[in-house]
Amino acid sequence: LSIDYLRFQSTQMLDLFKMEKRIIEKYDPTTLVTTNFHSLPNKMIDYQQWASAQDIISYDSYPAYDAPIYQPAFLYDLMRSLKHQPFMLMESTPSQVNWQPYSPLKRPGQMAATELQAVAHGADTVQFFQLKQALGGSEKFHGAVISHANRTDTRAFKEVAKLGHDLRKVGPVIKNSQTKARVALIFDWSNFWSFEYVDGITQDLKYVPIILDYYRQFYELNIPTDVISVDDDFSQYDLIVAPVLYMVKDGLGQKITDYVANGGNFITSFMSGMVNESDNIYPGGYPGPLKDVMGLWVEESDAILPNKDVKLAMTTGDELTGHLIADLIRLNGAHILAKYASEFYAGTPAITENTYSRGKAWYVGSRLDHASLRKIIMHVVDDVHLSALVKEQTELEITKRQNSAGQNIYFVLNMGKGKQPLPLEFQKGYRDLLTGDSPETLLDSWDVEILV
């Protein structure tokens, strides 16, 4: 009933939006109509349901000062993937916000880097809230292009002006260019809702952090990733990643099975394939309609207590650490990548791989820490022959868009990591669109290069 209520709320508000849009279009049939999505995915609004009603996706980005830098990147990739086309960064702040417990100023260069991060992930335009700083009300200390001083020689104003000139310079090359990803991460609002309503096993089931565990892996490897719905076309991807796919609606299990059978590669995890769209359990063992394609069934799930962990050992000898949940797995065709190495179920399967017709499926039975999950993801990346945008390891964020002329546009961003060398493969044969010159080979914090 709670999930149905959230579906009802999202649908009713969407109906209101559509009504308002029809009224606008009666008087202005040509101007694009949108409504701005906001921040970490809104639990009351199914953005994927709303996307088709938007003429263009628009998004408000206000990452907290202590948010990991891959979190806004994830949200930009989600916005781009909603319609698989460029989006608008509708709102952002040129300096600071008013609503955090601590609201530090953006450091010199940080504002431009964070705006260009949105462009790197698919934005074709960036805007600010607000133009002039409010004189009263709760947002009077929210940053603005023109501050209370009413001057144009302030640091924030000059940085915004410079960004505008830079965007005008590079815009003709970048506008309408696309991101081509061979990896897709599933984010699904019905799973978002249902997963966090689970009453049992552990109270610490949070959907977004677990999704981000997996997104972070591909972000740090500089492998382009779409963030898609369960209704998207899977066939365009070499790898589909679907952690905690708790709710599998009617037909989705067969869709995943067919995708793998036709040569696709699929990752899922603990707490997957457990319930249908009405939040009722699939009898016969988890992961329900995914049992055959995963080649296993889950008998029980152990709750790992806070500040505790469970040890795992890969067949290669590498040691792993898991948290939150440990699935007790029975094999039915899959083979073992890692076994548990602690608790009473030590020696039983923890992470598996299953060859299914022309494709493969992997199951991760616990929430692995970052270093442990990296070992599993690297195994999959190597198996699927996925290519990163840069060969050498780097702390820089690197993304790529391709314009209609087939020209590759590489964004190289130092998102506050201190001085970082430009990867060798970009040091010759490329031009920085922002300067018109060869790229600098050492990027300081918040430096950005756009290379063609």
Image: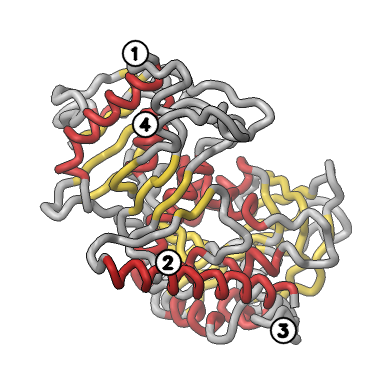
Q: Which residue is mark 1?
A: 153
Residue 361 position, x and y percent, is 53, 69
Observer-nearest residue: 157 or 382? Answer: 157
**Badge 2 element:** helix
Q: Is residue 352 visible?
A: no
Which of 410 and 338 lies nearest the eye of the viewer? 410
- Residue 431: give x, y in percent of width and height: 16, 29
Q: Which is nearer the N-term, disc 3 or disc 4?
A: 3
Closer to the chain start, of discs 2 and 4, is 2
Query: At 83% from the left edge and 41% from the top edge, which residue is drawn?
Result: 307
Mark 3 vs mark 1: which is more N-terminal?
1
Q: Is residue 48 above or below residue 398?
A: below
Q: Quick check: 234 left or right of 279?
A: left
Secondary structure beneath disc 4? strand
- Please tell me the numbered disc located at residue 282: 3
Badge 1: residue crowd in 10 Å (few <14, some 14–19, many ≥20): few
In the depicted structure, whether residue 177 falls above or below residue 27: above
